């Protein structure tokens, strides 16, 4: 000591210890909410029923299948422009192209072409499936034409077979259709057209027997009526004409062959 003054003790302040990071982390973890355990949701099992026939039905089922159709009723004829050269392809390629087009359109399975062949003029004759008539296939006329044109650009139309039904009409009164001034059988043809607009008679109605023989027998008083024959376009039309409730019903029959 100097001068009798007490010696001041200088105390060094010790720095406060910093809290340990580990303790702080532990403290934070104590206050942090514990995550909820994750649970996997239970699987739900479902029974899958097989598709029924109705669910498998085509988009455009079209007419129902028919059985017993004749070959004439199943025949389709394509019309083509003769100014366009014939393609160097097999006839069956058109049938294949048409069937692919019908399949793409999702038509019923019976609306298909079985085979096709080309005549000397280049027109294609196609036969439909046994359970389909040509009229059924023609409900998809545009589909058939467009498909056929992928093979033959000359095709511009398709229609039913130009079949002809031959009709015999019996007990035709001679006084009405043979006397002078009656215009003969042209009168009968006009009357049939007037009563049946759908009937197409391409040629003149004619007598079954020789007209001179009919006249001689009539003059002798042996007969007062005879039979005539004419053809109409389409066997269906011919059958409707025979079955129609008209004055021809009891005396009109259809022949088994066509004179065309």
Image: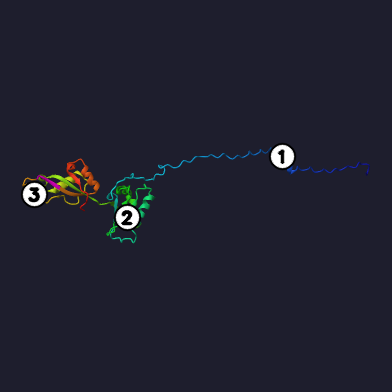
Residue picked out by circle 1: 27
Q: Which residue of the protein is positioned furthest toward the left in this rendering?
A: 220
For mark 2, does the 10 Å Cα neighbourhood hold few (<14), some (14 to 19), or many (20 or more) residues?
A: many
Q: Earlier in the sequence, mark 1 or mark 3?
A: 1
Q: Residue at x 15, y 48 (%)?
A: 228
Q: Earlier in the sequence, mark 2 or mark 3?
A: 2
Residue picked out by circle 3: 215
Percent x, y for residue 230?
18, 49
Horizontal relation, residue 39 to residue 177: left or right: right
Horizontal relation, residue 54 to residue 252: left or right: right
What's drawn in magenta, residue-wise?
223-227
Percent x, y for residue 141?
32, 50
Residue picked out by circle 2: 116
C-alpha span from label 2 to label 1: 91 Å
C-alpha span from label 1 to label 3: 134 Å
Q: Is residue 154 magenta?
A: no
């Amino acid at each position: 000591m100097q001068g009798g003054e007490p010696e001041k003790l200088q105390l060094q302040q010790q720095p406060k210890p910093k809290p340990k990071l580990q303790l702080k982390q532990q403290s934070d973890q104590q206050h942090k909410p514990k995550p909820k355990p994750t649970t996997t949701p239970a699987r739900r099992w479902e029974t899958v029923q097989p598709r029924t026939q109705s669910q498998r039905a085509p988009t455009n089922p079209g007419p129902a299948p028919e059985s017993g159709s004749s070959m004439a009723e199943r025949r389709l004829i394509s019309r083509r422009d003769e100014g366009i050269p014939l393609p160097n392809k097999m006839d069956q390629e058109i049938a294949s192209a048409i069937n692919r087009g019908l399949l793409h359109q999702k038509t019923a399975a019976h609306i298909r072409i079985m085979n096709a062949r080309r005549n000397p003029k280049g027109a294609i004759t196609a036969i439909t499936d046994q359970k389909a008539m040509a009229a059924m296939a023609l409900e998809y006329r545009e589909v058939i034409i467009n498909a056929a044109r992928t093979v033959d650009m000359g095709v511009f139309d398709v229609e039913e077979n130009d079949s002809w039904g031959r009709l015999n009409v019996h007990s035709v009164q001679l006084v009405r259709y043979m006397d002078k001034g009656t215009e003969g059988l042209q009168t009968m043809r006009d009357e049939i057209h007037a009563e049946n607009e759908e009937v197409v008679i391409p040629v003149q109605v004619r007598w079954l027997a020789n007209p001179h023989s009919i006249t001689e027998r009539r003059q002798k008083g042996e007969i007062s009526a005879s039979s005539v024959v004419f053809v109409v376009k389409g066997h269906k039309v011919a059958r409707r004409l025979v079955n129609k409730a008209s004055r021809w019903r009891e005396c009109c029959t259809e022949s088994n062959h066509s004179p065309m």
